[in-house]
Amino acid sequence: MKIFDLRNNRYTTTISLLFFLFIFSNCTKKFDELNTDPTTFSSLTPATIPNAFAKAEYQGIYGDPGIYELARALFPDYWCQFYADAYGAPTDRYVIVQDWIISQWNSVYTVTWPTLKKVIEATQNTDAGANAIAKIWKAYIFHYHTDFYGPVPYSHAGNGDLSIPYDSQKDIYYDLFNTLDSAVTTLQSLDQTQTPYGDNDLIFHGNIPKWIKLANTLRLRLAMRISFVEPGKAKEEAEKAYSLGVMTSNDDNAMMDVADNSPNGLSLMSPWEGFRMSASMESYLKGYTDPRMKVYYSPAASGQYRGLRNGLTSAQLSADPRNSLDSTSNIGALWVPDDASTNKLTVMYSAEAYFLRAEGALNGWNMGGTAQELYEQGIRTSLQQWGIADNTAIENYINGTSTPIALNDYFNSPAVASIPVKFSANVQEQRQQILTQKWIALFPDGIEAWAEVRRTGYPKLYPVANSDNPDVPKDSIIKRFLFVPYEYQTNNKAVVETGVPLLGGPDKSSTPVWWDVR
């Protein structure tokens, strides 16, 4: 599904909810046998539970091309500056297009959560392993969701009422910690050779030890997210997550299976728009001679790798040939339509766990190593993940002293930052280095990268060239999605209005979420 019309350079806002629901109910790998909307089920049968879980996994990560574009590419992927837009997309200039955001909201509340909730209910007293894994996935989908908006319907979501109250983000996070703790405890008590859901588990095929590591690593991520607002709670949760066992090698990476009828959304949507390497990425990757650049992006027609400043207007884009599609780098060859049914979707990388632990060590937490040791292992793990196997090249990169470069672009942009890869003796620079390398390693998960840029202010990024959002200046960043308009226009009007005070500020894109206190 194309939201941007390439033929006349015009954005369309006539998106049909019924169309989305049709697509959502027909695009999941393991759901061929399940042709009925799961939200209408009174219960699931043992035969349909694994298929339902597969659907909740795929939709929960916004895997389908249409929702991938609307929940990821046109919003967080621009705002974290993994990409810039060569067609002048309004969201790249901080415009909040509510007709697009609504698809993310609907995906959670009309498909993913109703399906997953039925799975949790159906396995509550019959299959402890399947139930625990489903609860881990609940934590995964809702941490993304609350990080988009702040307060959201959570504790009463899916109970059938027409008016659902909003929960504060703090309450949601605390419940996610409890959920992960309980799920891990359950899984640890089971026969570790069991395989709940079997091949219908698109991530680990029911491998319990790997689900335990994913749950603990997710817990570590959530702990770090609240480290500025509640450092004591963050330390407690992070140290417990590490003690229980987090992801440590690329064999632990959480990647989601895809197939012809449940493709990799990034691969299929990559030709649709003008998604191009951002200028910030160009400055960092070229300055560090980073070998991942040739994986993440494709060369321009000239054979060179060139980025684009975020937030350019259509007039600015057309004013200089350096801004054209042919002159700038598209997404890498790994994400092309021909590989959409084989190139797995990103859930979580082990490299991230090392950077989380490195930042924790910098905070004085017990993370099983020094900040430098964990930082360097995070880089090694990421480089190896993307096929860089030469140990000498890896160590040379880790000890590199070169810095990001100035660009020969439309603005003659100066270097985006001045830090090298080689670990600094300065603590503040160390934090910047950890978060910069983490940002590079998170690609292409722009949702997580956007959250970390909001939380920390790192990596340093170029300001957008133009902001068309009156609440967010061009040298700032979008802080959150707005609550969707129909929440104000339906039976939920009263509760969304009571949800706004839980945000701690007005319902604007400049209002930070609970954990964003820097």
Image (spheres, rainbow, N blue to C red):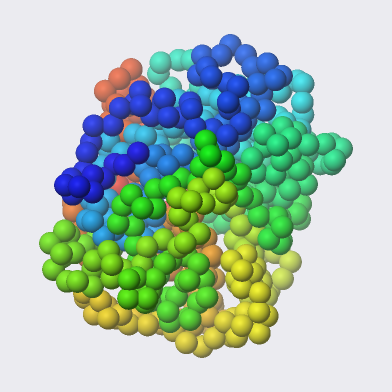
Residue at the limit of the structure toward the top, as seen here: 42
Residue at the limit of the structure toward the front, as seen here: 338
Point 58% across, 11% down: residue? 42
- Vertical position of residue 243 compared to residue 2: above or below: below
Q: Position of residue 288 (x, y in %)?
A: 48, 81
Whether residue 307 appears in this view of the structure is no
When asked about the image quadrant of residue 305, the answer is bottom left
- Vertical position of residue 299 compared to residue 169: above or below: below
Name the side, left or right, on which 496 lies relative to 444: left
Point 61% across, 83% down: residue? 393
Q: Position of residue 185 (x, y in %)?
A: 77, 39
When asked about the image quadrant of residue 500, the answer is top left
Name the side, left or right, on which 94 lies relative to 221: left
Q: Position of residue 51 (x, y in %)?
A: 63, 27
> Which image quarter holds the N terminus?
top left
- Vertical position of residue 290 compared to residue 360: above or below: below
Q: Position of residue 307 (x, y in %)?
A: 33, 70
Whether residue 135 appears in this view of the structure is yes
Point 21% across, 62% down: residue? 312
Q: How many marks?
A: 0
Residue toward you, 112 or 457? 112
Residue at the limit of the structure toward the bottom, as seen here: 401
Point 26% across, 23% down: residue? 489
> Which image quarter holds the C terminus?
bottom left
Name the side, left or right, on which 93 lies relative to 26: left
Residue toward you, 400 or 459? 400
Name the side, left or right, on which 448 lies relative to 498: right
